Image (cartoon, rainbow, N blue to C red):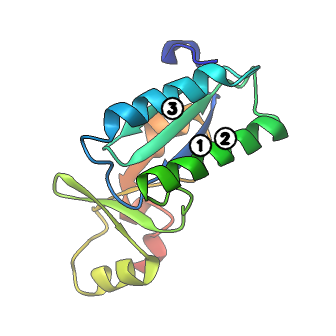
Amino acid sequence: MKIAMEELGDESKVIIYPGSRKFYANELPDLQDKVASFCNNLKGVDLNFEIRYDRFLVFFISDNTPLDLDNHNLLVSFILELEKTYEISLLDKVNVCFKQGPYVQLKEIPDFKLLIKNKGVSKKTIVFDNMITTKLEFKDSWEVPAGESWLSHFF
């Protein structure tokens, strides 16, 4: 069931689904409604969600009501439905998402390495760590300079 974000502690589980593109402005209201409905109808789990930068779908799941296997499967099925509806990839977490000015870009690792080589990005470029697992990490470590991230060994 969807609960207020303030009720979710710092140890709440975070699952981030990075979009292969931004959601278009005309898609966002429908997306918000679908995700809110999913959260409200998920039995036995206290959770909430955010859509960040019109690109990342982020679920916050209370550590008091963790996802069991059935609910995890329901979540993945729901994400797969969203992928079909919006013709977007949300399950690929291996690509690199990073800020370039006011924009969020997504590149495959070989393309990101090429950007490094060509000085298109630097150690100071803000990247998103979509593998974090808690609300506290989300607040403190989701957006970090590339030189302080798992990508640092490419520089």
Answer with left or right where residue 64 lies relative to residue 122: right
Looking at the picture, which amino acid does disc 3 mark? Answer: Val
Q: Nearer the viewer, residue 91 or 119?
A: 91
Q: Nearer the viewer, residue 37 or 63?
A: 37
Q: Nearer the viewer, residue 53 or 148?
A: 53
Looking at the image, which residue is at 57% across and 12% down?
Answer: 7
Q: Is residue 149 above or below residue 67?
A: below
Location of mark 1 (residue):
15
Location of mark 3 (residue):
35
Where residue 33 appears, x then y in whole percent?
44, 27
Task: Give the Cα separation between the discs numbered 2 and 1.
Answer: 10 Å
- The kind of secondary structure element at disc 3 is helix
Q: Decide if residue 63 is in sight here.
A: yes
Looking at the image, which residue is at 59% across and 25% down?
Answer: 39
Looking at the image, which residue is at 53% across and 39% down?
Answer: 137
Q: Earlier in the sequence, mark 2 or mark 1?
A: 1
Q: Quadrant of the C terminus?
A: bottom left
Location of mark 2 (residue):
75
Answer with left or right where residue 134 lies relative to residue 107: right
Residue 135, by quadrant, is top right
Q: Are marks 2 and 1 in contact (CB under 8 Å)?
A: yes
Task: Give the Cα separation between the discs numbered 3 and 2.
Answer: 10 Å
Task: Give the Cα separation between the discs numbered 1 and 3.
Answer: 14 Å
Q: Earlier in the sequence, mark 1 or mark 3?
A: 1
Q: Quadrant of the N terminus?
A: top right
Where residue 112 appears, x then y in whole percent?
36, 77
Looking at the picture, which amino acid does disc 2 mark? Answer: Leu
Q: Nearer the viewer, mark 1 or mark 3?
A: 3
Looking at the picture, which amino acid does disc 1 mark? Answer: Ile
